[in-house]
Image: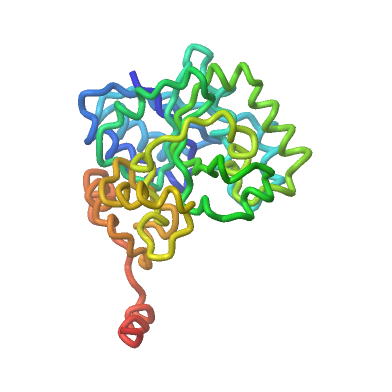
């Protein structure tokens, strides 16, 4: 059984269904338990998720609603939607019987087998994660206070050793960091994960979180990672649309068609973003 965590609000439910569809379609021999971290999903969206996960594919789903007092500590301190922070509290929100889980963002498609990813040994680590596409940004390390010899990672794919996080009292550390060092946080949960766990992270192959930055001419990743980044861009297992999203008309990611491939296996089949006339006209002038 592979435990998967998603955290969403009502605005991201259909995207989550597309992501999960890609996961299930490419991992048909595996059994999944999906844990949905949320704050009061409406009935229609909840039914959409149940239909995708349980009725269509036969996997297990558990909805975990985040308590109001925790949300209030998050909502008052960020320009990001507070649901982005729910993954930070997974070790407290999931049942104690769950010792390991794979967190996945909803703005991605999984085009390969995740059993190898799931099989990584985290005995000596709190989490496993992939180096971020902008890990060469010096300001990240200066602001968060650690050396670029330990790369800044992306929080869109996180393999979690929940028992280790519980032993570390990670939830308490997160709340303390939010309370005392909030001025250091610019990239929501991702900065907090890096600040607290950069010395407790197993760095995973880049193919397990192939980001927009891997596909651009202007590289912002650390120089020592460029070769692996180029290979991951050609042979991704997980494609993460970290910049412009496929459902936005101005997204030109070369893997955008794969998003639509899996979207067309869902109730949102055939829906495409409409490019405004003014944008088409501008593109002609710029051509």
Q: Could you tell me if residue 43 is visible in this image?
A: no
Q: Could you tell me if residue 230 is visible in this image?
A: yes
User: Looking at the rendering, in which quadrant would you find the N terminus?
Assistant: top left
Classify residue 109 by image quadrant. top left
Coordinates of residue 68 in the picture (x, y in percent):
66, 32
Left or right relative to 46: residue 273: left
Residue at horizontal 56 percent and vertical 23 percent from the top = 91
Coordinates of residue 102 in the picture (x, y in percent):
42, 29
Coordinates of residue 7 in the picture (x, y in percent):
49, 37
Coordinates of residue 73 in the picture (x, y in percent):
71, 37
Residue at horizontal 30 percent and vertical 27 percent from the top = 116
> Which residue, as the protein is rendered here, is positioned at the far right?
180
Q: Is residue 257 above or below residue 90?
A: below
Residue at horizontal 33 percent and vertical 71 percent from the top = 275
Q: How is the image coloured?
A: rainbow
Classify residue 47 by image quadrant. top left
């Amino acid at each position: 059984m592979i435990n998967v965590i998603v955290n969403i609000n009502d605005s991201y439910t259909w995207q989550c269904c597309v992501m999960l569809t890609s996961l299930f379609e490419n991992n048909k021999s595996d059994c999944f338990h999906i844990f949905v971290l949320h704050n009061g999903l409406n009935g229609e969206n909840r039914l959409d998720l149940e239909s995708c996960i349980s009725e269509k594919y036969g996997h297990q789903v558990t909805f975990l609603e985040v308590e109001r007092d925790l949300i209030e500590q998050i909502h008052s301190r960020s320009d990001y939607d507070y649901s982005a922070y729910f993954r930070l509290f997974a070790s407290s929100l999931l049942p104690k019987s769950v010792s390991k889980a794979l967190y996945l963002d909803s703005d991605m498609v999984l085009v390969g087998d995740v059993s190898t990813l799931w099989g990584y040994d985290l005995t000596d680590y709190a989490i496993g994660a992939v180096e971020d596409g902008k890990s060469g940004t010096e300001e990240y390390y200066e602001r968060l206070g650690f050396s670029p010899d330990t790369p800044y990672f992306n929080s869109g794919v996180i393999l979690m050793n929940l028992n280790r996080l519980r032993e570390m009292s990670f939830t308490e550390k997160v709340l303390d960091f939010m309370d005392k060092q909030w001025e250091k946080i610019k990239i929501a949960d991702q900065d907090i994960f890096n600040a607290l766990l950069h010395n407790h992270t197993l760095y995973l192959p880049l193919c397990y979180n192939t980001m927009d930055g891997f596909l651009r001419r202007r590289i912002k990743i650390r120089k020592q990672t460029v070769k692996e980044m180029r290979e991951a861009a050609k042979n991704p297992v997980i494609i993460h649309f970290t910049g412009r999203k496929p459902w936005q008309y101005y997204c030109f990611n070369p893997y955008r068609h794969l998003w639509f491939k899996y979207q067309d296996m869902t109730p949102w089949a055939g829906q495409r973003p409409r490019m405004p006339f003014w944008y088409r006209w501008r593109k002609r002038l710029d051509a």
